[in-house]
Structure formats: structure tokens, C-alpha cells
């Protein structure tokens, strides 16, 4: 039985990856940090808590001793680092802690593997945000990085460390440069989930308006459950490498609202108010993946299109919000 450490286990991707690895008969060790809302933090992984191959360990990515202890204790075959301060907008208000988690945190993982168990295969959650304001789309592994947020700067530092540890120390370290991926487990402050939740609440008479920032930015949105398969595939190759993962299609935030409107059966745009406070000091205007390398080498292909994705999310939110109707 293989053992995998997964950081960010309580998040969207961590929970889907844990399910995938358990299905593949792995022992999954999830890193969790203390929360003031202890009863709510396991929402995405509640259904896994009784699985004997699913073990949670306390720690924090920025606390190197907790990472070293974990690698020492389990000497895992695979280590997936998904933990991050993952909200781009929030990185402008908390740049230091974001940078610390998203870059030094990764260094802690790499150093623990290099010193304790160099045969551990490492996956880093890199991001299309690193392309920033590079308008040359579609973006591939060789496109120029031009980050425009503290979040993306931290992620680019981490990405460079992964490449460096692969070259300098021969670690089996891979970065997945993932474009936006969403699901019914997406955090409610990210734009797609904010939209599907509001659409459901407006439909049920629980909300009157939807305040959003920039509606013109373009994103390449896929379904998170499919993207964690790509992470696993990267670590099964003979040689480590970096891969762009995305659909190759790009849509504006307005397009997504139109899509949700069609599913919900009313014009959601009538309820949208553009609120400057949700706009960012600098914005990533256009993301569109060129996932040819992943298609050719990993044999990975996205299956869920934007409409299906919006439907999964909207229907989930509609059911969830019904309990608040009096
Ligand atoms: P998410 O839902 O926000 O989950 C982030 C996870 O990181 C949570 O489990 C969080 O734990 C954990 N975390 C944050 N700070 C930590 C710390 N200091 N120590 C330990 N754990 C910490 O994010 P996601 O959407 O699943 O994304 C997973 C990863 O992929 C992230 O690194 C993100 O930056 C990257 N990424 C995401 C996308 C996307 O579109 N989703 C695209 C490209 C890259 P708590 O529950 O305690 O907060
Ligand atoms: N969150 C949010 N809230 N975004 C809004 C809003 C709003 O009210 N209104 C407009 N937007 C715009 C943002 O300005 C951005 O252009 C776009 O919607 C998407 O925002 P998010 O859903 O917050 O995602 P993101 O693209 O900034 O970052 C996500 O994808 C990255 C990969 O490209 C996150 O998951 C990152 O962790 C990830 O690396």
C-alpha cells in the first residue's frame, strides 16, 4: 500500500484528491491546521473521516517542524502540496502571510523531503495566475510568467524552487500549472461559487442582489474533480516535469452569469451590481490554457464544459439553500 501526504486536505482539491487516492488503495495522511471553527472545518472531508486509511495530522505549512515530523513519521511515496492562501483578492490585504504560506511553506516541504526521504515524489500546486498580465494566449509551459498579485508572486517563487530542487538535487518534483477549476466544494468567496450560490438564493427569494467586481476578466474554468486526476498522473511518470492543466476555452465573468441564468430560468444579470470594492489593485485579464502537453503525455483530457459545471454548482446550491426557506 502506497502512502501519500496531502496538505490542504480540507480544501476543494484536497478533498477530491483524497477520494481519488483512497479509491486507488493509498493510505492518505492529511495535514490540518487549527481553526476557531473546529466543528465546520471538516465539511469537505466529513464522509472520509471513518475510513481507516484516512489519517489526519495537525500542523501548519509555515511551521517547518510539523512538516519534517510528518515526512519522518510516514516516509511517504508521494507528497501533494495543495495548501495555500488561495484567494488572490485576499493576498492584497494580507501579502506577508500569503507569501509566507505560498513560498516558504513550499520550501519547508522540499527541504524535509530532500533531508529525510529524497525518494518521495512531490507535487506542487502551481497556478495560471503566474502568467498574470501576459496577454499572449493560450498559455503553455513555455509562456512567460508575469505575476500581478502577492499570491502569484509567492506561487512563482515556489514554482521556481520546485524546478531548482529537481535540477539541483534530482528530486522527483513536479508542478501542475492549473487553470481555474471549480465545483460544488469551491470556496464561497470565489467568483463562480459566489454567483451560483447567489443565483440559487435569489431564485428562492432569500437574496435581492449580487455584488461583483470586474465582469470582463476571462478565465479558463474546468471541473476540479477531473483536475486532481492530472496531479496523480504527473507523479506516476518515469520522469518529473511541469504541466499546464486547463480546458483551452476562455469565458468572461459575464458569460458565466449568462450560463447560470439559462440554467436558473431567469436573467441573473438584472440583480448584479458592480461594486468597486470587489475590484483588485491589479488584475489578470486573460487566462486560456494550452493543455497539449498534458493531453499528449499524461493522456489527460477535461470532460465537463462550462454549462455542465455551472449546472452541477447551481443545483447543489439550490438544494443547500432550500433549508433556509421559511
Ligand atoms: P482551497 O479550497 O482554498 O484550500 C486551501 C487549503 O489550504 C485549505 O485546506 C486550507 O486549510 C489549507 N491551508 C491554508 N493555509 C495553510 C497553512 N498555513 N498550513 C496548512 N494548510 C493551510 O484551495 P483549492 O481551490 O483546493 O486549491 C488547492 C491548491 O491549488 C492551492 O494551493 C491553490 O493555490 C492552488 N490552485 C488552485 C486553483 C483553483 O482554481 N482552485 C488553480 C490553480 C492553483 P484551512 O481549511 O485550514 O483554511
Ligand atoms: N472572488 C471574486 N469575487 N472575484 C470576482 C468578483 C467577486 O466578487 N467579481 C469579479 N471577480 C473576478 C476577479 O477579479 C477575477 O478576475 C475573476 O473574477 C476570478 O476570480 P476568483 O474566482 O477569485 O479566482 P482567481 O482567478 O482570482 O483565482 C483562482 O484561480 C487561480 C488560477 O488561475 C484561485 O483559485 C487561485 O487560487 C488560483 O490560483
Image (cartoon, rainbow, N blue to C red):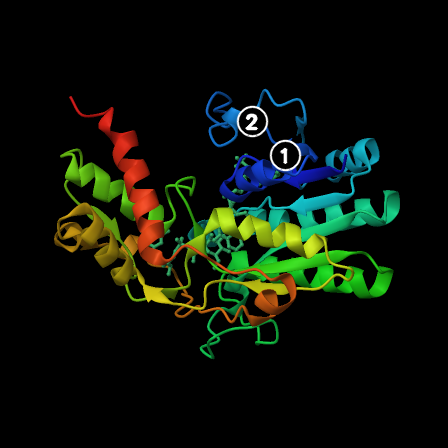
> Label 2's element?
helix
Of all residues shown, which one is farthest toward the bottom?
136
Closest to the observer, 24 or 56 = 24
Residue appearing at x 74%, y 34% in the figure: 66
In the displayed structure, does residue 308 sit left or right of residue 75? left
In the displayed structure, does residue 88 sit left or right of residue 240? left
Please name which of the two marks, 1 or 2, marks the residue nearer to the observer: 1
Closest to the observer, 106 or 303 = 303
Placement of 221 over or under 46, stated as above or below:
below
The circle on residue 48 is 2
Image quadrant where one finds the C terminus: top left
Q: Are marks 1 and 2 in contact (CB under 8 Å)?
A: yes
In the displayed structure, does residue 325 sit left or right of residue 192? left
Residue under circle 1?
A: 22
Residue appearing at x 67%, y 56% in the figure: 234
Residue 239 seen: yes
In the displayed structure, does residue 144 sit left or right of residue 90? right
Amino acid at each position: 500500500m502506497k502512502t501519500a501526504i496531502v496538505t490542504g486536505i480540507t480544501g476543494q482539491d484536497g478533498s477530491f484528491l483524497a477520494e481519488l487516492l483512497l479509491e486507488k488503495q493509498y493510505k492518505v495522511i492529511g495535514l490540518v491546521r487549527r481553526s476557531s471553527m473546529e466543528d465546520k472545518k471538516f465539511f469537505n472531508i466529513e464522509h472520509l473521516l471513518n475510513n481507516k486509511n484516512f489519517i489526519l495530522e495537525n500542523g501548519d505549512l509555515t511551521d517547518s517542524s510539523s512538516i519534517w515530523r510528518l515526512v519522518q513519521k510516514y516516509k511517504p511515496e508521494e507528497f501533494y502540496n495543495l495548501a495555500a492562501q488561495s484567494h488572490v483578492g485576499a493576498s492584497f490585504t494580507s501579502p506577508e502571510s500569503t507569501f509566507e504560506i505560498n513560498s516558504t511553506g513550499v520550501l519547508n516541504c522540499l527541504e524535509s523531503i530532500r533531508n529525510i526521504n529524497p525518494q518521495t515524489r512531490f507535487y506542487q500546486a502551481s497556478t495560471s495566475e503566474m502568467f498574470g498580465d501576459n496577454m499572449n494566449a493560450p498559455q503553455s509551459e513555455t509562456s512567460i510568467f508575469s505575476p500581478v498579485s502577492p499570491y502569484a508572486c509567492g506561487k512563482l517563487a515556489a514554482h521556481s524552487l520546485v524546478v531548482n530542487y529537481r535540477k539541483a538535487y534530482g528530486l522527483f518534483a513536479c508542478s501542475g500549472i492549473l487553470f481555474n477549476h471549480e465545483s460544488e466544494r469551491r470556496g464561497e468567496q470565489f467568483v463562480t461559487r459566489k454567483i451560483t450560490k447567489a443565483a440559487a438564493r435569489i431564485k428562492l427569494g432569500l437574496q435581492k442582489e449580487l455584488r461583483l467586481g470586474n465582469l470582463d476578466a476571462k478565465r479558463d474554468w474546468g471541473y476540479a474533480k477531473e483536475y486532481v486526476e492530472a496531479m496523480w498522473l504527473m507523479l506516476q511518470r518515469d520522469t518529473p516535469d511541469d504541466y499546464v492543466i486547463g480546458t483551452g476555452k476562455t469565458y468572461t465573468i459575464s458569460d458565466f452569469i449568462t450560463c447560470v441564468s439559462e440554467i436558473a430560468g431567469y436573467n441573473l444579470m438584472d440583480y448584479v451590481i458592480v461594486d468597486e470594492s470587489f475590484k483588485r489593485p491589479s488584475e489578470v485579464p486573460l487566462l486560456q490554457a494550452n493543455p497539449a502537453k498534458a493531453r499528449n503525455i499524461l493522456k489527460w483530457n477535461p470532460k465537463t464544459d462550462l454549462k455542465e459545471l455551472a449546472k452541477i454548482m447551481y443545483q447543489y446550491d439550490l438544494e443547500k439553500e432550500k433549508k433556509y426557506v421559511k
